[in-house]
Amino acid sequence: MTYSPDFHRKVLATKEEENLTLTAVTKCFKIAIASVVRWSKVLEVTDPVKLTVKP
């Protein structure tokens, strides 16, 4: 199944904001862990600033 870029952002934002594990976020959205891992890797490459640690 193909997910929209907006859905990718929603999943990754929810994971970060709610401090969820991969397993928890995938159960919440009923998607595969591999999808979230892949989207996270794409984010690392395309926007590394979003991955900086906040104090």
Image: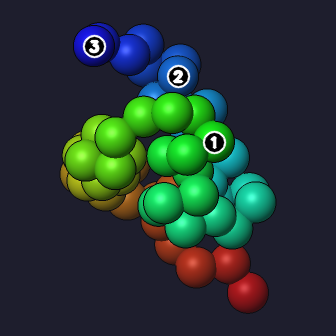
Q: Earlier in the sequence, mark 2 or mark 1?
A: 2
- Whether pointer 3 and pointer 2 mark residues with C-beta atoms closer than 8 Å, the reply is no
Judge left or right: residue 42 versus residue 36: left
Identify the element where label 1 is drawn: helix
Judge left or right: residue 37 versus residue 26: left
Instruction: Find residue 35 and report its image quarter.
Output: top left
Instruction: Point out residue 12 in the picture as x, y percentages from the top left corner.
Output: 54, 45
Q: Quick check: 40 above or below 6?
A: below
Of marks 3 and 2, the one in the foreground: 3
- Answer yes or no: is residue 12 visible: no
- Amino acid at pointer 1: Cys
Instruction: Point out residue 4 in the picture as x, y percentages from the top left corner.
Output: 42, 13
- Answer yes or no: is residue 50 visible: yes
Cα–Cα span, label 1 and label 3: 17 Å
- Whether pointer 2 and pointer 1 mark residues with C-beta atoms closer than 8 Å, the reply is no
Residue at 48% in and 60% down = 23
| Disc 1: which residue | 28
In the picture, the quarter occupied by the N terminus is: top left
Cα–Cα span, label 3 and label 2: 12 Å
Cα–Cα span, label 2 and label 1: 13 Å
Residue at 52% in and 22% down = 7
Instruction: Find residue 16 and report its image quarter.
Output: bottom right
Residue at 76% in and 60% down = 18
- Amino acid at pointer 2: Phe
Q: Quick check: 7 above or below 13?
A: above
| Disc 2: which residue | 7
Identify the element where label 3 is drawn: loop
Identify the element where label 2 is drawn: helix
Which residue is more in the foreground, 47 or 43? 43
| Disc 3: which residue | 1
Which residue is more in the foreground, 32 or 15? 32
